[in-house]
Amino acid sequence: MAKGNNTQNNQQQQEQRIERGYKIRQVTQIQPSWKEGERGEAGEFYIQLVLDNGVDEYIIQPSSDDVDVILEMFEKSKYTVWDDERRILIFENIPTK
């Protein structure tokens, strides 16, 4: 009986996600920034995502290890979107070779 309830719950959750839809916006500009930390401490990186030509914006705070990779992905991607609900950057059309 519990297995049937789990299946029904999973179906309901999937239907709710579909009804809700995903809020995906095109990243049309980025503004990388760095903020100084306290004396002797590491600073913080921020990347402001300008979405749909300024309709919305979102600020991500990648680690120092991730910031270079993210900026390189932006450089290689011809089209990037931000999934606001899942908080995912989706880089498209990146050549594999």
Image: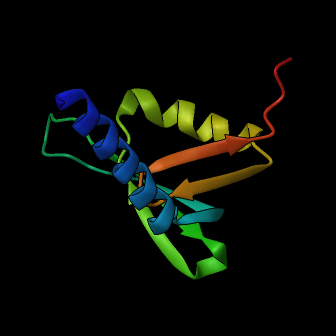
x then y, percent, for residue 35: 31, 53
| The image quarter in which residue 28 lies | bottom right
Total numbered labels placed on residues in the image = 0
Q: Is residue 90 left or right of residue 56?
A: right
x then y, percent, for residue 20: 45, 67
Q: Which residue: 37% across, 32% down?
A: 64
As drawn, the residue found furthest toward the top would be 97
Q: Is residue 65 left or right of residue 53?
A: left
Q: Is residue 64 left or right of residue 89?
A: left
Q: Which residue: 81% across, 21% down?
A: 96
Q: Quadrant of the C terminus?
A: top right
Q: Is residue 53 above or below residue 73?
A: below
Q: Nearer the viewer, residue 50 or 31?
A: 50
As drawn, the residue found furthest toward the front would be 1
Q: Which residue: 34% across, 35% down?
A: 63
x then y, percent, for residue 90: 61, 45
Q: Quadrant of the N terminus?
A: top left
Q: Which residue: 66% across, 77% down?
A: 53
x then y, percent, for residue 9: 28, 45
